[in-house]
Amino acid sequence: IESVRRRPDVKSAAYRVMAGDQELGAALRDRFPRLNLEATAGSAAGIFEGFLTRFAGGLLAPVLDGGRRAAEIDRTLAQRDRLRAEYAQAILVAFQEVEDALVTESRERRRLASVKRQLDLAQRSAARLREEYLNGQGGYLDVLAALTNEQELRREVLTTKRRLIEARIGLYRALAGGSLPRAEGRAP
């Protein structure tokens, strides 16, 4: 779980959610009246008049704004919910990519084990057919067929090992959050 949280795309989505929470907090804070006390130089009547204007404006502005502040809260709530949904989607995509990479690697490991068993059996069969040929009990075409089969299985072992390495690279990419475009017909 921690390695998925460290992915750049998941981190970015988490930071966007935090920013959305901050915007919501600012909208909620802006909804309530504010009282600013400032000291200014001038006549007593001018200071008092300016104080009353700012005081009345700070208290009445949230009431008389025509619902603009309430609408801003609704907008930031919707935006925060959208950002949370994007974060959840980023986490789901990350887990899906990691799971797919793990399944691919597991499948290639099983395939490699199977091909190695086949190769072992093909080597035994080729050795037995060669021995029978040398003893005059079999034909050389059977030996050639067994050798051809053994060589094909050796190539298949190498191909499967390459696929296994590619699957491991795909797993590392999934854990790191970097997905490069796949070439057609190749493992991730």
Image (spheres, rainbow, N blue to C red):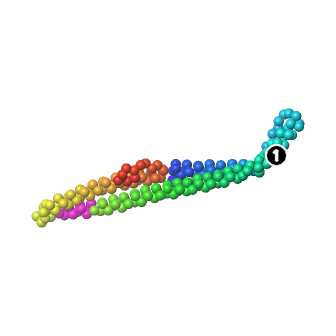
Q: Residues within 10 Å of mark 1 (few under 14, many from 20)?
A: some
Residue reaching furthest to the left: 136
Left or right: 77 with respect to 35?
A: left
The main secondary structure of the magenta stretch is helix
Determine if the magenta segment contains residue 128.
yes
Which stretch is magenta?
119-131
**Looking at the picture, which amino acid does disc 1 mark?**
Ala
Query: Residue 162: where, in percent of width, then height?
Result: 34, 52
* Residue drawn at x 43%, y 58% as measured from the top left: 100
Q: Position of residue 89 (x, y in %)?
A: 53, 56
Q: In the current view of this chain or complex, which residue is farthest to the top?
A: 42
Residue lying furthest front: 66
Depth check, front residue: 152 or 143: 152
* Location of residue 106 by image quarter: bottom left
> Does residue 53 appear left or right of residue 31 in this picture?
right
Compared across the picture, whether 32 is left or right of 181 comes to right
Q: Which residue is drawn at 21% across and 63% down?
A: 125
Residue furthest bottom in the image: 137
* Up/down of 79 relative to 146, above or below: above
Q: Where is residue 112 in the image (x, y as percent from the top left)?
A: 33, 59
Tell me the quarter of the picture where residue 160 sits: bottom left
Q: Is residue 130 visible?
A: no
Q: Residue at x 28, y 62 (%)?
A: 118
Per the image, the residue denoted by label 1 is 56
**Residue nearest the observer in this picture, 1 or 174:** 174
